[in-house]
């Protein structure tokens, strides 16, 4: 199984990518500056708070990743 990290995974396009990847059976990690409320999370996806500009949470966010998609 491939771990896919989606930068901006809580935005309009990113959410669609997360949904599609989870539906295809991939392990998905959604990265965003703010974690979505539980009712907005896609079942089967992992959500990680990270800020690429500030560099916070980046090590955790990309641990074990193989492919990063930025919508």
Image: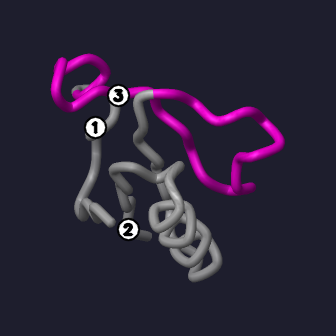
Magenta stretch containing residue 41, yes or no? yes
Residue beneath label 2, please? 2
Q: Name the residue rendered at 23%, 60% in the picture.
A: 66
Judge by depth and name the residue closer to the eye, 13 or 58.
Answer: 13
Relative depth, front residue between 67 and 69: 69
Of the two numbered discs 2 and 3 in the rendering, the one whose residue sits closer to the viewer: 3
Say few, some or many: other residues with alpha carbon within 10 Å of mark 3 (under 14 / 14 to 19 / 20 or more): many
Where is the N terminus found, in terms of image quarters? bottom left
Q: Quadrant of the C terminus?
A: bottom left
Give the percent coordinates (x, y) of residue 43. Answer: 74, 55
User: Left of 65 or right of it: where is 20?
Assistant: right
x then y, percent, for residue 46:
56, 44
Residue drawn where x is 28% and y is 37% of the image: 63
The image position of residue 59, as x and y in percent, is: 23, 26
Q: Which mark is residue 50?
A: 3
Q: Residues within 10 Å of mark 1 (few under 14, many from 20)?
A: few
Q: Circle 2 — which element?
A: loop
Query: SS at mark 1?
Result: loop
Q: Quadrant of residue 31?
A: top left
Farthest residue toward the right?
A: 39
Which contiguous range is marked in magenta? 34-58
Q: Which residue is mark 1?
A: 63
Q: Mark 1 and mark 3 in contact (Cβ < 8 Å)?
A: no
Q: Residue at x 46, y 62 (%)?
A: 14
């Amino acid at each position: 199984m491939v771990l896919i990290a989606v930068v901006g995974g809580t935005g309009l396009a990113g959410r669609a990518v997360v949904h599609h990847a989870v539906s295809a059976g991939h392990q998905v990690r959604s990265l965003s500056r703010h974690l979505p409320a539980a009712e907005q999370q896609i079942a089967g996806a992992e959500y990680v708070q990270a800020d690429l500009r500030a560099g916070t949470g980046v090590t955790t966010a990309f641990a074990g990743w193989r492919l990063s998609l930025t919508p």
